Image: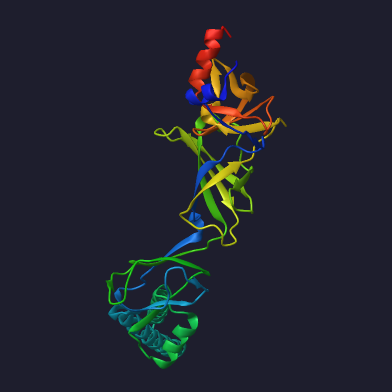
């Protein structure tokens, strides 16, 4: 069809150049960068008490055993006292068992008395093990428990330490705050690798498989699809695709990004244009390409689409100008010409 530049302008026709698109990658889909759940830990209060000091801040990196905060706790005092009391009871039970064993050898007591002493010694040993485990759960190391055993120096102050080398992603308490046992204190996470969670339209999911390469726009290191969900979000008609991406510090949890996912390519030459430039007529698709003095309609094959862009193959180059505005006017002219 013939059109002068003035006519094209009056009809609101806008053009753009196609962008070369790799047919082994999808169009960019929005992705949410999140911390993998196995790499997230919540450090909770081992005993009730009051926070007296914070040794870390949000964003800090910590090593295994590094102090996170300090608690003052009457409950911690009680745990130590009960442990030392159980130790003393065990010593008495063992001594009593030794005496009764000697008496039994001299036939001074019956066997049932010896058996009773043996049961009491076993029970005392079990109580010591239980109290020792309670101290372990409160954060005391074996060395600290040994010092408590030898020195009987009871302390009201407990240091909570990092269980893993990680980054501090959140602190949910402040100095002076009183806490119940098991109250959350600090959230820690290992930040490499991270997950990219991508919502893919259900109509486009067929070519995406676990193990496929994933490229995050603006990030050099590719990731890999580790999950293609078997369920569809009823509200958005999308399917969750989860990719694992190595992180060298450039990706950040909570950020949004654009991700392209690999699929098996037919090796076609493909071009990306805005969605508004595609002309549909039943199952047939085409575009309007500028020529000298007007436009011509070029049939194309639709390879991929989202709400903003389409990827097509056909007799197009990156030097062509493709109409992306005024499409209705162009279709109307063609209709009047009987084409």
Q: Is residue 267 left or right of residue 288?
A: right
Residue 149 vertical position relative to residue 302 in the rendered view, above or below: below
Q: Is residue 169 left or right of residue 190?
A: left
Classify the position of the C terminus by image quarter: top right
Q: Position of residue 279 (x, y in %)?
A: 55, 21
Closer to us: 244 or 102: 244
Please give the name of the residue rendered at 52% of the width and 16% of the height, measured from the top-left corner: 331
Residue 213 vertical position relative to residue 118 in the rendered view, above or below: above
Badge count? 0
Q: Could one spot residue 255 in this view of the protein?
A: yes
Please give the name of the residue rendered at 39% of the width and 34% of the height, measured from the top-left corner: 235
Where, by quadrant of the figure, is residue 117 drawn?
bottom left
Q: Which residue lies most toward the top here?
A: 338
Where, by quadrant of the figure, is residue 152 drawn?
bottom left
Closer to us: 229 or 168: 168
Q: Could one spot residue 107 in this view of the protein?
A: no
Q: Position of residue 210 (x, y in %)?
A: 61, 41
Q: Which residue lies most toward the bottom here?
A: 151
Please give the name of the residue rendered at 62% of the width and 19% of the height, measured from the top-left corner: 296
Residue 7 vertical position relative to residue 180 in the rendered view, above or below: above
Q: Which residue lies most toward the right here?
A: 267
């Amino acid at each position: 069809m013939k059109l002068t530049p003035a006519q094209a302008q009056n009809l609101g026709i806008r053009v753009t150049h196609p962008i070369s698109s790799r047919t082994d990658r999808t169009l960019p889909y929005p992705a949410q960068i999140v911390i993998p759940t196995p790499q997230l830990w919540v450090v909770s209060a081992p005993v009730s008490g009051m926070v007296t000091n914070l040794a870390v801040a949000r964003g800090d990196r910590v090593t295994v055993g590094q102090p996170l905060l300090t608690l003052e706790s009457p409950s911690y005092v009680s745990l130590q006292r009960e442990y030392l009391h159980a130790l003393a009871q065990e010593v008495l039970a063992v001594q009593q068992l030794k005496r009764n064993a000697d008496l039994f050898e001299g036939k001074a007591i019956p066997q049932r008395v010896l058996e009773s002493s043996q049961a009491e010694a076993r029970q005392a040993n079990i109580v010591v093990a239980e109290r020792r485990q309670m101290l372990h759960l409160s954060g005391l190391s074996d060395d600290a428990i040994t010092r408590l055993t030898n020195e009987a120096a009871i302390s009201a102050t407990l240091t909570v330490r990092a269980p893993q080398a990680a980054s501090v992603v959140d602190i949910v308490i402040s100095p002076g705050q009183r806490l119940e046992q098991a109250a959350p204190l600090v959230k820690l996470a290992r930040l490499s690798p991270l997950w990219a969670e991508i919502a893919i339209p259900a109509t486009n999911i067929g070519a995406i498989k676990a193990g496929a390469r994933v490229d995050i726009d603006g990030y050099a290191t590719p990731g890999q699809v580790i999950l293609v969900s078997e369920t569809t979000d009823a509200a958005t008609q999308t399917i969750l695709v989860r990719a694992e991406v190595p992180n060298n510090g450039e990706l950040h949890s909570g950020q949004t990004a654009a991700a392209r996912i690999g699929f098996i390519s037919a090796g076609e030459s493909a071009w990306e244009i805005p969605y508004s430039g595609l002309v549909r007529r039943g199952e047939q698709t085409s575009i309007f390409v500028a020529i000298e003095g007007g436009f011509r309609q070029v049939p194309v094959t639709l390879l991929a689409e989202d709400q903003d862009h389409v990827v097509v193959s056909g007799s197009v180059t990156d030097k062509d100008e493709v109409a992306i505005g005024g499409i209705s006017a162009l279709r109307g002219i063609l209709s009047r010409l009987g084409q």
